[in-house]
Image (cartoon, rainbow, N blue to C red):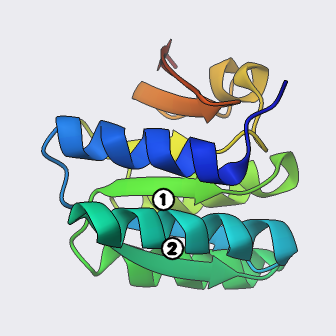
């Protein structure tokens, strides 16, 4: 059974609260899936005192790069990414170029990105966390 976005959002916000993360940004594809996912995380965060700043993007690589650049300028270093495999490389390259992939940054990926993609050659150096089907897991990628 795959948990609903609401159950995943609840677990995600609980993770933030337990780890003292009170400001988070969410990068999401601007479609029915991504927008709804971001909205439920935003609402769950508000209820628990976690500030969630949403950033939507279209399927255009240019749009993704410009949205990630705007995100980098916020100073927030905890990012939930609600995206698909086709977006991963563009997001990662833009995040690296804008200083969002570092030992002081955290990315949490939705289940639209597979573990094999995160562990593959495109994954950034350091630690990644994945949110997949309601469970949090830690993955290391060494390039």
Residue for point 20% across, 66% down: 49
Q: Which mark is residue 95?
A: 1
Q: Position of residue 31 (x, y in %)?
A: 84, 77
Tell me which residue sits at (74%, 68%) in the image.
Answer: 34
Label 2, label 1: how far apart the Cα atoms are: 6 Å
Q: Position of residue 26 (x, y in %)?
A: 49, 66
Q: Is residue 18 in view from this perspective?
A: yes
At x 71% / y 22%, what residue is drawn? Answer: 115
Name the residue: 83% across, 46% down. Answer: 85
Disc number at residue 68?
2
Give x and y (percent) for residue 96: 45, 53
- Compared to 58, does 130 lie above or below? above
Q: Position of residue 17 (x, y in %)?
A: 22, 45
Give whichever of 133, 61 is nearer the camera: 133
Tell me: residue 18, above or below residue 6: above
Image position of 88 (left or right of 92):
right
Q: Quadrant of residue 123?
A: top right
Kindly check if marks 2 and 1 are in contact, taking CB atoms under 8 A apart as contact.
yes
Quadrant housing residue 69: bottom left
| The N terminus lies in quadrant | top right
The residue nearer to you, when weighing 36 against 84, is 36
Q: Is residue 104 visible?
A: no
Q: Is residue 104 left or right of residue 64?
A: left
Task: Classify 10 Å Cα crowding around label 1: few (below 14), some (14-19), many (20 and above).
Answer: many
In this image, 140 relative to 20: left or right?
Answer: right
Q: Residues within 10 Å of mark 2 (few under 14, many from 20)?
A: many
Q: Earlier in the sequence, mark 2 or mark 1?
A: 2
């Amino acid at each position: 059974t795959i948990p609903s976005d609401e159950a995943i959002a609840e677990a995600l916000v609980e993770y933030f609260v337990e780890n003292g993360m009170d400001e988070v940004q969410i990068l999401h594809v601007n479609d029915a899936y991504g927008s709804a996912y971001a909205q439920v995380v935003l609402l769950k965060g508000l209820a628990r005192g976690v500030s969630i700043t949403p950033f939507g993007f279209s399927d255009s690589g240019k749009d993704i790069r410009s949205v990630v650049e705007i995100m980098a300028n916020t100073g927030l270093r905890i990012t939930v990414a609600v995206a698909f495999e086709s977006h991963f490389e563009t997001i990662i390259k833009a995040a690296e170029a804008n200083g969002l992939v570092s030992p002081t940054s955290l990315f949490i990926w939705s289940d639209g990105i597979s573990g094999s993609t995160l562990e593959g050659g495109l994954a950034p150096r350091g630690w990644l966390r994945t949110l997949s089907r309601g469970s949090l897991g830690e993955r290391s990628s060494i390039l």
